[in-house]
Amino acid sequence: MESFNIYGEEASMEWHMEDEPQVLFRMGPLEEKRGRNITSERVTPPLRPDLLPPELAYYIMHQADLDPNNPHQSVLQGNGHHGSHPHLVHEFVRSIVEKCKPWIDTIKAANWTAAGICAHESAMNGGKEILIPSFI
């Protein structure tokens, strides 16, 4: 399952199902009694093509053209993971041109990837505990 959860003090966002919008939770002030009032709504974040050069923005603007019978088409067109790929490519290329550290550097990428590799190894070995290395 591909999903994410972002938790904050005043709001949280969760996404669990591929074809459903994300859920935004807003927390009211802490009351004297136990807990807070919480509201939720389904939201679809904007694609933000304005943050990309036109050559890359094209790829996130054409998601509606995807063929549901070709599940890999989104990756080939560059809009996989809900349009994040062109943004990631743009940020990485900018880091090279501007000679600065990319937001997702080698250490962050290794830490993220190691968890998946270890989970797969565990699954292939009957759920055996696999320690995830840390790349600092």
Image (cartoon, helix red, strand yellow):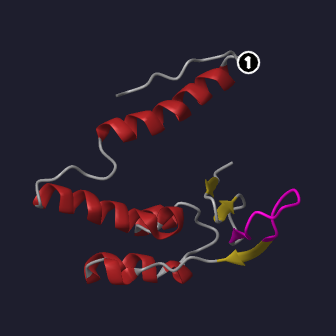
Residue 128 falls left or right of residue 61: right
The amino acid at mark 1 is: Gly
- The residue that appears at 46% across and 82% down in the rendered structure is 62
Q: Residue 27, image x and y in percent?
A: 72, 67
Local crowd at mark 1 within 10 Å, few (<14), some, or many (≥20)?
Answer: few
Residue 39 falls left or right of residue 4: right
Q: Residue 69, image x and y in percent?
A: 64, 68
- The residue that appears at 30% across and 39% down in the rendered structure is 106
Q: Residue furthest right?
A: 33
Q: Residue 131, image x and y in percent?
A: 56, 18
Q: Residue 124, image x and y in percent?
A: 66, 22
- The residue that appears at 72% across and 20% down in the rendered structure is 127
Residue 57 falls left or right of residue 68: left
Q: Please state the extent of the stretch shown in magenta in the rendering.
A: 22-38
Q: Looking at the figure, which quarter contains the C terminus?
A: top left
Up-down relation of residue 124 to residue 101 (above or below)? above
Task: Count every numbered label the image shows and give the total.
Answer: 1
Up-down relation of residue 61 to residue 3 (above or below)? below
Up-down relation of residue 52 to residue 36 (above or below)? below
Judging depth in this view, the residue of 109 and 11 nearest the camera is: 11
- Residue receiving disc 1: 126
Mark 1: which secondary structure?
loop
Judging depth in this view, the residue of 59 and 50 nearest the camera is: 50
Quadrant location of residue 45?
bottom right
Quadrant location of residue 90?
bottom left
